[in-house]
Image: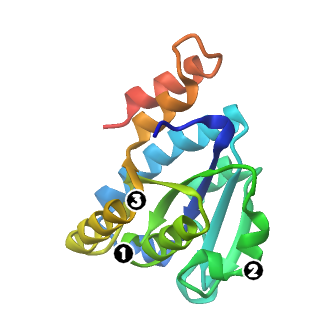
Amino acid sequence: MIAQAEKSQLIIIDMQEKIASAMPKEIINKMIRRLEVIQTACNELGIPQIFTEQYPKGLGHTLTEILPQLHDARFVEKTVFDCTNEPAFEKCLVRTRSQVFLLGMEAHICILQTAMSLLKKGKDVFIIEDLVASRNISNKQNALNRLRECGCIITNTESVVFEWIKSSEHEAFEKIAPLIKSID
């Protein structure tokens, strides 16, 4: 299945200070650079974004580096691991957009549980592999394997963006292309 901008919505799960501090700094830095690309594409293409914070009183708030791109995103505070069990999250989901793109932390907890619930609700769930993390790489790999087996589409930042814009002639290409070149 190919990503289609007009059917898409992006969910940024728990990209928070204390969770990020438990991850290797190099991985977080790469995620932040890639997230800038995805968020720019979303903002250019009118793709709705939701971002969540798991118990911010204890885990801190969303990383300041990604906040500037979240100006139109909807915010959900939660204490549940499966985002769909939070009524405010359910209200933010755009029912008419069947493709849901998940990224954030941690792959084997909130990403996994949310993805499985969204599949049950009939959504096409895409996991942006280079934008999910777990403290332990084997937990991330296990989660990705389970998600693939359940029917999620495992993809990456560049694939998603180029599928969304479809052509180098798209008006957003000139803004997004330099950002793509800057990620490694």
115 or 38: nearer the eye?
115
Q: Name above or below for residue 83 compared with residue 160.
A: below
State left or right for residue 33 relative to residue 84.
left
Residue occupied by mark 1: 108
**Which structural element holds mark 2?**
helix
Regarding residue 181, the answer to whether it shows in the image is yes
Give the residue type at disc 1. His
Q: Residues within 10 Å of mark 2 (few under 14, many from 20)?
A: few
Residue occupied by mark 2: 87
**Which structural element holds mark 3?**
loop
State left or right for residue 109 relative to residue 81.
left
Q: Name above or below for residue 61 compared with residue 29.
A: below
Coordinates of residue 61 in the picture (x, y in percent): 61, 73
Regarding residue 63, the answer to whether it shows in the image is no
State left or right for residue 104 relative to residue 10.
left
Give the residue type at disc 2. Pro
Nearest to N terminus: mark 1 or mark 2: 2
**Which structural element holds mark 1?**
helix
Coordinates of residue 173 in the picture (x, y in percent): 56, 20
> For the residues marked 3 and 2, what is the alpha-carbon distance in whole angstroms?
25 Å
Coordinates of residue 175 in the picture (x, y in percent): 58, 23
Nearest to N terminus: mark 3 or mark 2: 2
> For the residues marked 1 and 2, what is the alpha-carbon distance in whole angstroms?
22 Å
Q: Quadrant of residue 159?
A: top left
Please give the label number shown on residue 151. Answer: 3
> For the residues marked 3 and 1, what is the alpha-carbon distance in whole angstroms?
16 Å
The residue under the point 71% across, 72% down is 89
Coordinates of residue 124 in the picture (x, y in percent): 54, 53
The residue under the point 75% across, 80% down is 87
Nearest to N terminus: mark 3 or mark 1: 1
Q: Residues within 10 Å of mark 1 (few under 14, many from 20)?
A: many
